[in-house]
Amino acid sequence: SSDRIMLVFSDSSEAEPISQQLQIGHPVDVFNTGKEAMENALQDKPALITVQKTIDGSISGLDLCRKIRSEMGDWGRNVPILMQVGSQQGLEDIRDVGQEVGVTDWLAKPYSPEYVRTKVRIAMLRTPCRWIKADVPKDEPERLHALRSTNLLDTDAEDRFDRITRIVARAFDVPTSLVSLVDEHRQWFKSCQGLCATETHRDQAFCAHAILQEDVFVVSDALKDDRFADNPLVTGAPYVRFYAGVPLKVKNTGFSLNTNEEDDDVTKDMNNLHLTKNPKDEKTQWTPTSSLTSSPPLEGYLNDPRYHQVGTLCLIDSRPRNLDEEELQMLRDMGALVEEELQKSLESGIPYPPSTKNNTNAENNKRALTA
């Protein structure tokens, strides 16, 4: 086979921008009918074919793909075939049929030049386009212990978190805002505005990237970011284009896998908190003696063993956008309010593991986002 790329588009205006992007590295041939494409494919055996879903009255893009796979021998069975569709919803409508006839991958509008080049490059290597999952934090065992010690996973919605996500969604004019807690294999939503799902797989989670940062993690346009362009949460519902998440930290609960005496001394200096008794009902009350928002400083706490990032307060939009410095500071401030509630839960005195009721809820609530 050659190194040529074949575009099969009945609409020349649709083919032109793709052709311009691909001509940098490969010669590109454009055909307007399925019959013409079939004749030339058999002769030239291009390295990759990109075909429009609707070509002409005699044959559809799916039919062309089926014919190439079934009638053109080993080359036809192995050549990468990308199919262009007019929208993300259009992709969802034909994805299953496309897989049956042998479509390798999809170009769903809107897409950027970088996205097209990435799709083509990976298809040429005969591997499916994949998003990049986040690294595991260095303090993962301690971080998970701190998260689970809050006893918030798989619990019911609470106004103290929901009022914050409601305010954030309105203030930033986004359809979705979340308090996301990043567990071992999932991100679970303690508070959720704008989504019906309760969790997603951690490998797909933008928030898994955010907890590795010291400051707000912003993705202005996921389709232009190689880490996320092919993420199922970008190519399918909820069609994430913009993401901003401020990491949420809590103070160490005293759990440590390190037996170094110096580290032990650090973990003993817990939260500068004390517990008081209410004389009327004898219930334990959480009373802070210092604010979590004023300590530690913004920079440097990722290397401070007293603090662990357990989740995010995040914004999601299906439109590309960015945040100015004033908006970034507002998101930090709202995140600090969520941190105070997380710290209250961690210091409430309820021992880990959670109750049997919560464990049952965990099994019932394992629902990931679906397209």
Image (cartoon, rainbow, N blue to C red):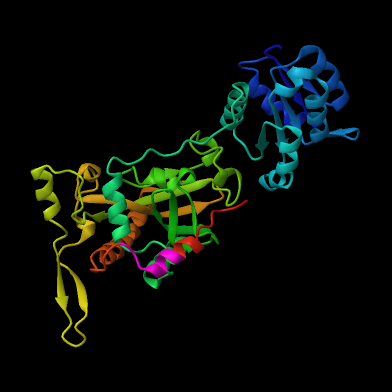
**In the picture shown, does residue 345 fall above or below 298?**
below
Q: Residue at x 62, y 25 (%)?
A: 123
Q: Residue at x 76, y 34 (%)?
A: 101
Q: Considering depth in this image, is 351 or 18 the residue closer to the camera?
A: 351
**In the picture shown, does residue 143 fall above or below 124?**
below
Camera sees residue 155: no
Q: Considering depth in this image, is 158 or 240 the residue closer to the camera?
A: 158
Task: List x then y, in percent, for residue 28.
Answer: 71, 18
Which of the 4 image quarters holds residue 291? bottom left
For this orientation, the residue located farthest to the front is 356
**In the picture shown, does residue 75 fall above or below 231?**
above
Residue 140 in magenta stretch: no
Q: Which residues are magenta?
A: 353-360
Task: List x then y, in percent, for residue 202.
Answer: 45, 47
**Which secondary structure is most common in the magenta stretch?**
helix
Q: Classify residue 115 as left or right of residue 93.
A: left
Camera sees residue 318: yes
**In the picture shown, does residue 264 fall above or below 150?**
above
Task: List x then y, in percent, for residue 89.
Answer: 69, 48
Task: List x then y, in percent, for residue 222.
Answer: 52, 41
For this orientation, the residue located farthest to the right is 58
Which of the 4 image quarters holds residue 38? top right
